[in-house]
Structure formats: structure tokens, C-alpha cells
Amino acid sequence: MSRKAKFLFGASVIVLAVASLIYTAVRETSAYFITVEEYAQSGDAHAGKHLRLAGRVSDGTVKWDPKTLDLEFVIAPIPPKEAAAHEEAGSGRAVAAVATAPVAGASLPVRYNGILPDMFAADRDVIVEGTVEGGVFHAKTLLTTCPSKYESDQYESEASGEPAKDDLTASLAAPGVP
Amino acid sequence: MSEIGRLAIILGFLVALWGIAASVLGAVRRDARLIDSGKHAAYAFSALTGIAVLALLYLLLTRDFNVEYVASYSSSTLPIWYTISALWGGMKGSLLWWTFILAVCNAVVQVQNHDKNRDQMPWVTATMLVVGAFFLSLLVFITDPFERLPFTPREGSDLNPLLQNYWMTIHPPSLYVGFVSTTVPFAFAIAALATGKLGDAWIRTTRRWALFSWFFLSLGNLFGAAWAYVVLGWGGYWAWDPVENAAFMPWLTATAYLHSVMIQEKKDMLKVWNMALVILTFALTIFGTFLTRSGVISSVHSFTQSGMGPFFMYFLIAILVISIGMLVWRLPLLKSRNELESVFSREAAFLLNNLILVGIAFTVFWGTIFPVISEWVRGVKITVGPPFFNKVNAPLGIALVFLMGVGPVIAWRKASAASLWRSFATPMGTGVVAGALAFVLGARNFYAVVAISVATFALATVWIEFWRGMRVRQAMMGEKPWTALSRLIGKNRRRYGGYIVHVGVVMIFMGIVASSVFKLEVQRSLHVGDSIEIGGYTVRYDGIAIENDDHVERTFARVSVWDGYGPEAVRVGEVLPEKRFYKKPKQPTTEVSIWSTLGEDLYVVLGSYDPPTQLAVFQVFVNPLISWMWIGGLVLTIGTGVCMWPSYAERPATATARVPAGSRPA
């Protein structure tokens, strides 16, 4: 073998090694990223699989026990109107799909154990990661998507009154505490 | 003042266009007056963007809430330091800031080269102004940072609380300096391709710039990690988020370039490869800006989607098409004069290091864009998270650190078995002993044991290099140990500075390994007086304190830290994790509190707090060797400083600098 061939052989071994590392890691760690609607439409196809599910926390369904850190809530689709607004802002097609195919009654109970993220509250958009077992989504991670991200979306106009403290009370005194 | 700013960016844009036209025409027609005019345009461009930045700063500091940007990113109660950092806290401001740094780099390049590289300079000027004009065009036509509102809000909506942190005041500027300064080597590469002068001149001119941008990319990434660690409160510092990846990829390719460029200087090989790395690094910085501003890939860190994505995409495509086209056009001039002689040689080790660095960059790229690709190809969005990146990069990272030990000492051209044994027996032995020791002491994770072993090996080779060099000087010159050491470093700044950087990187590597593998975590709700025992510490919840002002309400948990468990525990200090409520954006945030030692960090998070019962939920982590990362960053800084410091040999005419050190009379 000439030197050049040897060198090319060595380089291709490394390239193949990296490629196979990527391949196996993708197979072992990837998760389907779908919305609550898409989940409902797909029936049992996703049961037991590793999922990332995007949806909204249904109002009045949040139960959190600060003693055991057990959290339960129902995740529902993000309403079409706002999903369309999201789409306009270019925030991704997964959410936009909701706008075109609304399914009534598509929602799913979620269970999670751990500290609540700062921005977690009823009516907020969340992404949960985990698996569905027995009709319940067992979330390993819970991410809140802040609609304004790094940008503040509104300034206090002259019309607005006292700053609301709901968020603070909501985050400090979690629901479920007597 | 907003009118002045607006005028400055419009004029800046026009001046840039003129500068591009004049430089290119001047270069083609060999017209010195046009070339000079282009150079003056570059200075004017710098002055005008400087004026625009000052105008925006003035508006922020005078709290002119009639200006949309000021109203969106500051408030009357925002401390002055964060008001200044609001300059780059929002998208429009960050674009202006970016352009400004580019303009400063451009001015510095003009000054450095006022009587050098005469043929290349017009192309350099034109390339840098093209990039500058692109960024300014966004501000002129798409999103105006000086836009006024139809009414004047009574109050601004404030800077995002997550950005109100000291790391955030230095992380974006250093990252931007790192990003933007990659334009300089890129511009010289384009100039070399355009003029066909593809010798070492452009490499020597940009070597220090490449190191400069690599250094700021390193710092930017470390500061970003530090920010995530103290602000985001999930116990870690790196989540493989697309935005983090965007900053990491150019760092990887820049690191590859810094190494492969030595092969070109010494052996006149890898010319095409080096050119490609320079282009790739610059393209990745633009790709990073695109990622953070387009919303193509969802990220926790990104700026609001802005419809600016397509422009960055077109710009990126244009850069790649033009520069790769020029590279292909000049391929015949880029033939290497040497070939690889042996697999056991420094050339081969460096080549391998390059392949691995680019391989890591590719895996990071692939993982980042995987959701988009899977949606195109299979119609379903599939994401890969941190486990993917960790799985793929753990073996690659270990291989890289191993090569870090091999590269500096293996012989050029072809290493004989005897020289391999001489160079590597001791450090290899040390590495194996360290791995065995780690195993005996209880480390059972395969990667951790290998990583410890490999890191020790890399440190040992560096140590031996310093030690041998010092002994030789002591013997030959009769110098005292410290004199010998400092002269050794002084005479070979690049080499020994590089070794010091390696020590810093190995420390960071050890911090990453230890904190990912040996991390401990507990979550529990506590009544006042209750405690948690974790990793040799007792953490006791002593009560709550509240502080309130116009800007923020802070709820502290007073938590005492004890060394040991039970009655023997000794109180060593107190941490104050808090919940904050920022009043302008009406947003709660969590502030962690860290008890940091050289060996480990005790990281305490106040999860939630119930006022009537004083029941509080805590999350406590023990993260080993985190401080090594920050100390490693400091070592890296010192090492880079040693490399960059103008050496005495370079000051006189280049002829004397070319004489090998050994042939000089003692």
C-alpha cells in the first residue's frame, strides 16, 4: 500500500468510527417531538416510546404536593389561534400543525416528580419529556417555554395599573398547599 | 439622539458600500488612490458605527422610553451596569454591537498593515466591509434599533431578569469578540485566494488573530457556562442547547486550525485544509448567529424569532459558494510540497487531532440540526438531547486529550520505536498508575477511569517537557532553576505558552468529567430546622428572610452548611438560595447559592416556599471539581498571554527570527 492509500485508509476508519458513534447514539437517545394533538391522532403508535410532547397546562388541573414533590396536571393542545400566531412568528411547524387540524378532547394526564420550574403555571406552554404508560405521561423532564423568550413583549403602558403579583404568589405558594 | 444614531448607521452602510467598490476597483486597476479611499472608508465605517453605539448607549442611560429598544430592554430601576449591558441584551442592539466590534477589528487591521501586505489589503478591506455592510443593512432596512414609539411609555419593561447577572455582562461581549474576530483570518484567506499569493504571509499575519479569536471564543463559552451554572439553577453548566452548540462549533474548528497551521509552517502541508478550516470557522459563526435569530431550531436561549433567518441563510450560502469557489479555482496553487511519511509522527498526530476536532464539530452540528433533517426526510420531528452529545463526544474527547499528550513530544517525520519508548514510557506509566489509583479509590465508571488516566498522561508529558527543558538550560548555561524556567518559556513563547494552555484545557476536561460522572443530587421539602445529608455535608434550613425594593423582591432561605453528619458535624458557613420576583417584567426567578471549595461545589436551590407553613422545597447538588473549570480557564488565559506576548525574536527583522534557537551563540 502506498503512503497515500494508508493515510486515506486511516482517515476513513476515523470517519466511519465517528459515523457509527453518531448512528448508535441517535438510535439510543432520540425522542419524537410531537404535539398533544399529534399524539391523540396517532392512537397507540407512541405508547412506550421516548417522547417530547408540546402542549399547554390545562387550567384547574394542577395538583402539586410540596411534601412528596409529586406533580400532576393535564396537558392539552395549544389553542389554534395562538398556535397560528406562533407560526407567524416562525416558532416551528410542530406547533403550527395544531392550527390546521384541531382535535376536540385531545389531552393527557402528566405525572412528574421534582421542583417546579419558575415559569410553570396553569395556561402556560410546556414541553414534557418521557414515556406514556397506561394512558399517563410519565415525565422525566419538564420545560416551560417562556413566550417572550429573551425579549420582553410589552412595556408598561400608561393604562396599566399596579403590577400584578399573581405570578409570585403562584410560584411561591404552590397549589395543593392548604 | 436617535436621529444621530439612525443617520450614523445609514451613512455607515453607504460608506461601507463605497469602501467595497473602491477597494475592489483599486485592486483590479492597481489604482493607489482608490485603494487609499477604500482604507479611509474603513476608518469612517468604524467611526460611524462607534457613533451609533454611543447614541444607543446615551438613549439607554438617559432612559428615553420613547425609543422602542430602550423601553423593551431597560427600566428606570435597572442598575446602571445592566443598563449598559442592555446594549447587547436585545436583538437589534446585539446586531449593532456585533457590527461595532467588526469595525474596531477592521480599524486595527488597517493600522497593523498600513505598510504591509499591500497587494492583499484592498481585498481584506473589501471582505470585512462586505460583512459589515451586511449587518448594517439589517439595521437600516429590517430592524431599526433607534425606532421611536407613537407614545412614551411611563416605564420600560426591563431587561430579562435572567440577563441581570454579572456573567451576562461579560459573556456576550467576549463571545462576540471571538465570533467577529474570525472575520480577520477569513478576510486574509479571501485576499490570499484573490491575489494568488498563497504563501505563508497570510498565515503569519493572521496567526495571532486566529489565536485571539480562539481565546475569546474559549472565554465566551466558559463565561456562558458559568452564567448557566449560577443563573439557570438546574445544577449544570452545559445543556447542549442549540445556542451553546452554535458557540462551541467555531471554537472546535478554530482549535483545529491553530494546530494544523503549525504543520503548514513547518512542513508546507495541509494548505487546502487550513484554508477550508478558516472558511468553515467563519461560516460557523454566521451559522451561529443565524441559529440564534431564526427560530429554525427551538432553543431556550434564542432571541425572539424575527424573520431575519432567511437573510442570514442567503448570506451564509453566498459566503460558502464564493469562498469555496475561489478555493477550487486556486487549488493548483495550493499543492503541498511534502507528504506524510509515517503514522508515528507529529504530523500524523496533528492530523488525527484535526480529524477528531472536526469530527466533534460535525457531531455537534448533526445533533443540532437533526430535528430539521428528520422532519425533511421522514416527516417527523426527532430530537436528540444531551445524552446523544455526551455519548458521542465522551470517547472523542478522551481521544483528543490522549493526542494532547502525544502531539507535543512525538518526533517530526518519523518516530523510531526507541524514541517512542523514551518519550512515552514515563508519562504512559504515570497515566496508568493514576487510572488504577482512581479505580482503587472507588471510581467504577469506565469513562471516568480512562479519562483520569489519559488526562494524567497528558499532564505528565507537559511536565516532562518543562522539566527537561529547564534541566538542559541549568546544565548548559549554569542558570538557577527559576531563571532557567522563565528563560525557557521566554525563548519559546508559542511552544511553552501552548503547553500552559494544554494544562488549562486538561483542568477544564477533568472538571467536566468529574462533575458529570460523580455528581450527587437530592430534592426534599423541609420545615425550619430540618436538614439534608449529602456527600459528607449536612445542609440545614434555618429560616426565611425577605428583602424588597422597587426593582426586585427577594425571598432568601437561610441555610447553614455543616461538614459531616449528625452530632459531629461542624458548621462551616451559610448559603442563601433565593427566589426573586422582578417587578417590571413580573417574572419570578431562582437564584442558587453555592458553597464552593477546590474539591467540590455544594449547590443549593430554593425550589419553592410556602409562607404560612414556612415549608420550603430544596434541591441540593454536590458537583465535584467545578472550580477546576474556572481555574483551568485562568490557566488557559495565562498560557494564551504567553503565546501572544510579542517575543523579542520577532521584533527585529524577520531574518534573525528565522535562525533556529540552538544555532545562536550562547
Image (cartoon, coloured by chain):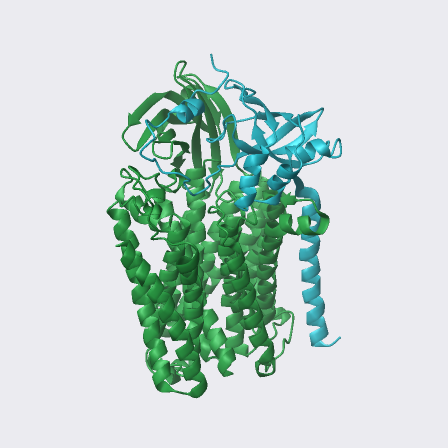
Chain colours: A cyan, B green
| Quarter of the image that includes the N terminus of chain B | bottom left
In front of the other: B500 or B292:
B292
Q: Quarter of the image containing the C terminus of chain B?
A: bottom left
Give the answer, above or below, for where B617 lies relative to B448: above
Residue furthest to the top in view is A178
Nearest the eye: B184 or B491: B184
Name the residue located 44 percent from the left edge and 69 percent from the top edge: B130
Residue farthest toward the bottom in the current orientation of the protein: B30
Q: Is residue B407 left or right of residue B34?
A: right
Residue B247 position within the rendered picture, expressed as x and y whole percent measured from the top left: 49, 54
* Residue B636, quarter of picture: bottom left
Q: Is residue B474 visible?
A: no
Q: Residue furthest left?
A: B62
Q: In the image shown, does A176 or B617 lie closer to the viewer?
A: A176
Task: Tell me the residue at 52%/30% (across/down).
Answer: A124
Give residue B236's position: percent from left, percent from top: 49, 40
Q: Give the vertical position of B21 relative to A120 (above or below).
A: below
> Which image quarter: residue B600?
top left
The answer to whether residue B303 shows anywhere in this view is yes
Residue at position x 61%, y 72% in the image? B415
